[in-house]
Image (tube, grey):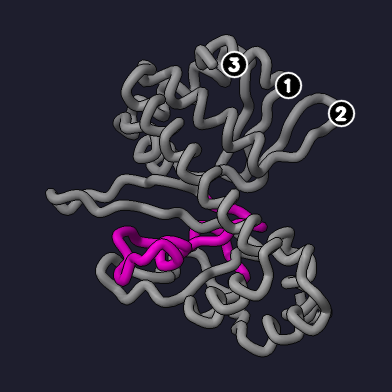
Amino acid sequence: MANKTKLWYLQNFNFFETMKPSDMMDLENNTSMKAEKKKEIIYFPEEASDTIYFLKEGKVKISKILDDGRSTVMQILGPGEIFGESSLLGDEQHENIAEVIEDALICTIDKDIFTGMMMKNPGLTLRITRFIGWRLRHIENHVEDLVFKDAKQRIVSFLIRYIENFGKKMVDGWMVRPFISQQDIADLTAVSRQTASQTLNELKSGGLINFTRRFLSTSSLDKLREVSGD
Protein backbone atom coordinates (compact mmCIF):
# COMPACT_ATOMS: atom_id res chain seq x y z
CA MET A 1 0.00 0.00 0.00
CA ALA A 2 2.91 2.33 0.73
CA ASN A 3 3.83 2.43 -2.97
CA LYS A 4 0.30 3.22 -4.14
CA THR A 5 -0.76 6.86 -4.02
CA LYS A 6 -4.22 8.24 -3.40
CA LEU A 7 -4.41 9.23 -7.08
CA TRP A 8 -3.55 5.65 -8.10
CA TYR A 9 -6.46 4.31 -6.07
CA LEU A 10 -8.85 6.89 -7.47
CA GLN A 11 -7.74 6.27 -11.05
CA ASN A 12 -8.45 2.55 -10.56
CA PHE A 13 -11.96 3.24 -9.27
CA ASN A 14 -14.45 2.43 -12.04
CA PHE A 15 -16.68 5.42 -11.32
CA PHE A 16 -13.97 7.82 -12.49
CA GLU A 17 -13.08 6.25 -15.83
CA THR A 18 -14.74 9.06 -17.81
CA MET A 19 -13.05 11.93 -15.96
CA LYS A 20 -10.32 14.09 -17.51
CA PRO A 21 -6.83 14.15 -15.97
CA SER A 22 -7.43 17.69 -14.72
CA ASP A 23 -10.66 16.60 -13.02
CA MET A 24 -8.84 13.64 -11.47
CA MET A 25 -6.24 15.99 -10.00
CA ASP A 26 -9.08 18.12 -8.62
CA LEU A 27 -10.62 14.99 -7.13
CA GLU A 28 -7.31 13.99 -5.55
CA ASN A 29 -6.91 17.45 -4.00
CA ASN A 30 -10.35 17.25 -2.42
CA THR A 31 -10.25 13.72 -1.04
CA SER A 32 -8.68 12.21 2.05
CA MET A 33 -7.47 8.63 2.31
CA LYS A 34 -7.36 6.72 5.59
CA ALA A 35 -6.67 3.15 6.69
CA GLU A 36 -9.32 1.80 9.08
CA LYS A 37 -8.93 -1.25 11.31
CA LYS A 38 -11.47 -4.03 11.78
CA LYS A 39 -14.33 -3.03 14.13
CA GLU A 40 -13.80 0.70 13.55
CA ILE A 41 -17.08 2.62 13.20
CA ILE A 42 -17.20 4.96 10.19
CA TYR A 43 -20.46 6.63 11.16
CA PHE A 44 -23.42 6.18 13.50
CA PRO A 45 -27.15 6.81 12.93
CA GLU A 46 -28.22 10.45 13.25
CA GLU A 47 -24.72 11.75 12.49
CA ALA A 48 -24.55 14.38 9.75
CA SER A 49 -24.62 12.82 6.29
CA ASP A 50 -22.21 15.12 4.49
CA THR A 51 -19.47 12.78 3.25
CA ILE A 52 -19.15 10.31 0.39
CA TYR A 53 -16.98 7.24 1.02
CA PHE A 54 -15.05 5.23 -1.59
CA LEU A 55 -14.03 1.78 -0.36
CA LYS A 56 -10.70 0.80 -1.93
CA GLU A 57 -9.68 -2.18 0.21
CA GLY A 58 -11.34 -4.34 2.84
CA LYS A 59 -15.00 -4.78 3.73
CA VAL A 60 -17.61 -2.64 5.49
CA LYS A 61 -21.00 -3.71 6.79
CA ILE A 62 -24.01 -1.42 6.84
CA SER A 63 -26.43 -2.17 9.70
CA LYS A 64 -29.72 -0.73 10.83
CA ILE A 65 -30.49 -0.21 14.50
CA LEU A 66 -33.98 -1.47 15.33
CA ASP A 67 -36.39 0.13 17.80
CA ASP A 68 -35.60 -2.52 20.42
CA GLY A 69 -31.89 -1.72 20.24
CA ARG A 70 -30.87 -4.75 18.18
CA SER A 71 -29.04 -4.29 14.90
CA THR A 72 -29.62 -6.05 11.60
CA VAL A 73 -27.04 -6.17 8.82
CA MET A 74 -28.35 -4.71 5.57
CA GLN A 75 -25.32 -4.99 3.29
CA ILE A 76 -21.72 -6.14 3.09
CA LEU A 77 -19.63 -3.82 0.91
CA GLY A 78 -16.31 -4.60 -0.78
CA PRO A 79 -13.62 -2.83 -2.82
CA GLY A 80 -14.93 -0.61 -5.61
CA GLU A 81 -18.15 0.41 -3.84
CA ILE A 82 -19.28 3.73 -2.45
CA PHE A 83 -21.34 4.35 0.66
CA GLY A 84 -22.87 7.34 2.35
CA GLU A 85 -24.49 8.00 -1.03
CA SER A 86 -27.88 8.77 0.57
CA SER A 87 -26.57 12.29 1.14
CA LEU A 88 -26.68 12.74 -2.64
CA LEU A 89 -30.42 12.04 -2.43
CA GLY A 90 -30.98 14.76 0.17
CA ASP A 91 -30.62 12.85 3.44
CA GLU A 92 -29.09 15.11 6.08
CA GLN A 93 -28.45 12.36 8.65
CA HIS A 94 -27.31 8.77 8.45
CA GLU A 95 -29.99 6.20 9.21
CA ASN A 96 -27.58 3.27 9.50
CA ILE A 97 -24.26 2.38 11.07
CA ALA A 98 -21.15 1.62 8.97
CA GLU A 99 -18.56 -0.67 10.55
CA VAL A 100 -15.29 -2.07 9.20
CA ILE A 101 -15.29 -5.88 9.25
CA GLU A 102 -12.01 -6.36 7.37
CA ASP A 103 -9.13 -3.86 7.53
CA ALA A 104 -10.04 -1.19 5.01
CA LEU A 105 -8.66 1.70 2.99
CA ILE A 106 -11.23 4.43 2.45
CA CYS A 107 -11.20 7.68 0.47
CA THR A 108 -13.63 10.41 1.51
CA ILE A 109 -14.89 13.61 -0.07
CA ASP A 110 -17.30 16.32 1.01
CA LYS A 111 -20.78 15.75 -0.44
CA ASP A 112 -21.11 19.29 -1.83
CA ILE A 113 -17.74 19.14 -3.59
CA PHE A 114 -18.61 15.76 -5.10
CA THR A 115 -22.02 17.03 -6.21
CA GLY A 116 -20.26 19.88 -8.01
CA MET A 117 -18.00 17.40 -9.80
CA MET A 118 -21.01 15.37 -10.88
CA MET A 119 -22.62 18.47 -12.38
CA LYS A 120 -19.50 19.05 -14.49
CA ASN A 121 -19.14 15.43 -15.55
CA PRO A 122 -22.29 13.79 -17.03
CA GLY A 123 -20.47 10.46 -17.33
CA LEU A 124 -19.79 10.40 -13.60
CA THR A 125 -23.39 11.35 -12.85
CA LEU A 126 -24.65 8.49 -15.03
CA ARG A 127 -22.37 5.95 -13.31
CA ILE A 128 -23.40 7.09 -9.83
CA THR A 129 -27.09 7.05 -10.78
CA ARG A 130 -26.80 3.53 -12.15
CA PHE A 131 -24.96 2.41 -9.04
CA ILE A 132 -27.62 3.80 -6.73
CA GLY A 133 -30.26 2.05 -8.85
CA TRP A 134 -28.32 -1.21 -8.64
CA ARG A 135 -28.02 -0.90 -4.88
CA LEU A 136 -31.75 -0.27 -4.49
CA ARG A 137 -32.49 -3.39 -6.56
CA HIS A 138 -30.04 -5.34 -4.42
CA ILE A 139 -31.89 -4.24 -1.29
CA GLU A 140 -35.23 -5.13 -2.88
CA ASN A 141 -33.91 -8.63 -3.70
CA HIS A 142 -32.74 -8.96 -0.10
CA VAL A 143 -36.21 -8.04 1.16
CA GLU A 144 -37.84 -10.50 -1.26
CA ASP A 145 -35.59 -13.26 0.09
CA LEU A 146 -36.71 -12.46 3.63
CA VAL A 147 -40.39 -12.60 2.63
CA PHE A 148 -40.56 -15.51 0.22
CA LYS A 149 -37.75 -17.92 1.13
CA ASP A 150 -37.26 -20.21 4.08
CA ALA A 151 -34.23 -19.94 6.36
CA LYS A 152 -32.02 -22.37 4.45
CA GLN A 153 -32.83 -20.79 1.09
CA ARG A 154 -32.07 -17.31 2.44
CA ILE A 155 -28.69 -18.40 3.75
CA VAL A 156 -27.76 -20.16 0.50
CA SER A 157 -28.90 -17.16 -1.57
CA PHE A 158 -26.69 -14.94 0.57
CA LEU A 159 -23.71 -17.28 0.12
CA ILE A 160 -24.15 -17.20 -3.65
CA ARG A 161 -24.19 -13.39 -3.74
CA TYR A 162 -21.26 -13.21 -1.34
CA ILE A 163 -19.18 -15.54 -3.50
CA GLU A 164 -20.14 -13.74 -6.71
CA ASN A 165 -19.27 -10.33 -5.23
CA PHE A 166 -16.07 -11.16 -3.35
CA GLY A 167 -14.86 -14.55 -4.57
CA LYS A 168 -12.19 -15.62 -7.02
CA LYS A 169 -12.73 -18.28 -9.69
CA MET A 170 -10.33 -21.15 -9.12
CA VAL A 171 -9.57 -24.27 -11.18
CA ASP A 172 -11.79 -26.37 -8.91
CA GLY A 173 -14.48 -23.80 -8.02
CA TRP A 174 -14.72 -20.52 -6.10
CA MET A 175 -12.87 -19.17 -3.09
CA VAL A 176 -13.49 -16.17 -0.80
CA ARG A 177 -11.00 -14.96 1.82
CA PRO A 178 -11.74 -14.24 4.60
CA PHE A 179 -15.24 -15.48 5.52
CA ILE A 180 -17.56 -13.30 7.59
CA SER A 181 -18.90 -14.31 10.99
CA GLN A 182 -21.85 -16.62 11.44
CA GLN A 183 -23.55 -13.89 13.46
CA ASP A 184 -23.33 -11.51 10.48
CA ILE A 185 -24.82 -14.20 8.25
CA ALA A 186 -27.62 -14.69 10.77
CA ASP A 187 -28.29 -10.94 10.86
CA LEU A 188 -28.28 -10.65 7.07
CA THR A 189 -30.71 -13.53 6.61
CA ALA A 190 -33.00 -12.92 9.61
CA VAL A 191 -32.26 -16.24 11.33
CA SER A 192 -30.74 -17.18 14.67
CA ARG A 193 -27.00 -17.76 14.93
CA GLN A 194 -27.77 -21.39 15.76
CA THR A 195 -29.76 -21.78 12.53
CA ALA A 196 -26.97 -20.15 10.52
CA SER A 197 -24.37 -22.46 12.07
CA GLN A 198 -26.51 -25.56 11.57
CA THR A 199 -27.24 -24.71 7.92
CA LEU A 200 -23.60 -23.98 7.11
CA ASN A 201 -22.54 -27.28 8.65
CA GLU A 202 -25.25 -29.16 6.72
CA LEU A 203 -24.03 -27.60 3.47
CA LYS A 204 -20.47 -28.53 4.39
CA SER A 205 -21.44 -32.12 5.23
CA GLY A 206 -23.29 -32.34 1.91
CA GLY A 207 -20.19 -31.29 0.00
CA LEU A 208 -21.74 -28.06 -1.29
CA ILE A 209 -19.35 -25.73 0.55
CA ASN A 210 -16.26 -25.77 2.69
CA PHE A 211 -15.44 -23.05 5.19
CA THR A 212 -13.47 -21.89 8.18
CA ARG A 213 -13.16 -18.42 9.68
CA ARG A 214 -10.52 -17.74 7.06
CA PHE A 215 -12.26 -18.83 3.87
CA LEU A 216 -15.42 -19.99 2.09
CA SER A 217 -15.24 -22.21 -0.98
CA THR A 218 -17.58 -24.10 -3.29
CA SER A 219 -17.00 -26.36 -6.26
CA SER A 220 -20.30 -25.38 -7.92
CA LEU A 221 -22.48 -22.29 -7.71
CA ASP A 222 -25.08 -24.09 -9.85
CA LYS A 223 -25.58 -26.73 -7.14
CA LEU A 224 -26.04 -24.00 -4.57
CA ARG A 225 -28.63 -22.30 -6.81
CA GLU A 226 -30.63 -25.53 -6.89
CA VAL A 227 -30.89 -25.33 -3.10
CA SER A 228 -31.60 -21.60 -2.97
CA GLY A 229 -34.54 -21.62 -5.36
CA ASP A 230 -32.96 -18.82 -7.43
At a point 63% along the width and 27% down the height, the residue shown is 210
Left or right, residue 30 beside residue 95: right
What number of labels is visible? 3
Give the residue at mark 3.
225
Residue type, label 1:
Ser
Residue type, label 3:
Arg
Q: Residues within 10 Å of mark 2 (few under 14, many from 20)?
A: few
Residue 99 visible in the shown view: no
Residue 171 badge: 2
Of badges 3 and 1, nearer the viewer stands 3
The kind of secondary structure element at disc 3 is helix
Inter-mark Cα distance, 2 to 3: 20 Å
Residue type, label 2:
Val
Disc 1 or 2, which lies upstream in sequence?
Answer: 2
At a point 41% along the width and 62% down the height, the residue shown is 89
Residue 61 badge: none
**The residue positioned farthest toward the left in the image shown:** 68
Residue 213, relative to residue 226: is it above or below? below
Disc 2 or 3, which lies upstream in sequence?
Answer: 2
Q: Quadrant of the C terminus?
A: top right
Residue 53, how many percent across, how many down?
53, 69
Residue 190, how many percent across, how many down?
32, 32
Residue 44, how many percent across, how many down?
32, 68
* Region of the chain picked out in magenta, as a range: 77-106
The kind of secondary structure element at disc 2 is loop
Inter-mark Cα distance, 1 to 2: 9 Å
* Corner quadrant of residue 80: bottom right
**The residue positioned farthest toward the right in the image shown:** 171
Residue 95, relative to residue 121: is it above or below? above
Left or right, residue 88 beside residue 15: left
* Corner quadrant of residue 7: bottom right
